[in-house]
Amino acid sequence: MSIRITQNNCVGCGRCIEACPGNLIKKDAQGKAVIKHISDCWGCTSCLKECKTGAISFYLGADMGGAGSTLSVKSKGDIREWCVTSPDGSVQVIEVNKKDANKY
């Protein structure tokens, strides 16, 4: 399990760096988030939930039933969009209102 950071989507806010419990994410010379040793990633998804631009995606390997899909999150106000992108390019979006997150 590991994350992937899309440099073009990163705005350099640093929220992912603050959220990473393993202190694995750093800023590069351009101020964008990078992770040097992907294999050290714990797969906790803390950074994923903090990224407001969808620059971080979580690799869902075959061992998790994802067969190479990726999971990313975007926030729009109180709505959090969880996007699962399959290797074939198809995307499934699940919208969750943060106000209802603890309702169930």
Image (cartoon, grey):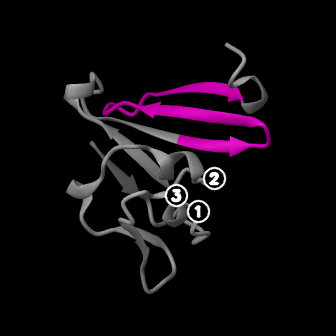
Are the residues flagged by discs 1 and 2 in contact, CB closer than 8 Å? yes
- At a point 69% along the width and 23% down the height, the residue shown is 102
Q: Please state the extent of the stretch shown in magenta in the rendering.
A: 73-97
Q: Amino acid at mark 3?
A: Ala
Q: Position of residue 84 (x, y in %)?
A: 45, 31
Quick one: 86 or 26, which is closer to the camera? Answer: 26
State the residue lying farthest toward the top: 104
The residue tagged 2 is 52
Q: Position of residue 28 (x, y in %)?
A: 42, 80
The x, y position of residue 95, in whole percent, is 65, 26
Task: Quote the CA–CA distance across marks 3 and 2.
Answer: 13 Å
For label 1, the crowd category at 10 Å Cα-Cα, with few meaning under 14, some 14 to 19 and many 20 or more, is some
| In the image: residue 8, left or right of residue 99 | left
- For the C terminus, the quadrant is top right
Query: Gap in Å between the C-alphas at discs 1 and 3?
Result: 6 Å
**Which amino acid type is shown beneath numbered disc 1?**
Arg
Q: Main secondary structure of the magenta part?
A: strand
Residue of label 3:
19
Q: Residue at x 52, y 33 (%)?
A: 83
* Badge 1 or badge 2: first in the primary sequence: 1
The answer to whether the residue labelled 1 contacts the one labelled 3, judged by CB atoms less than 8 Å apart, is: yes
Residue corresponding to mark 1: 15
Q: Between disc 3 and disc 2, whose residue precedes?
A: 3
Does 93 lie within the magenta span? yes
In the rendered image, which quarter contains the N terminus? top left
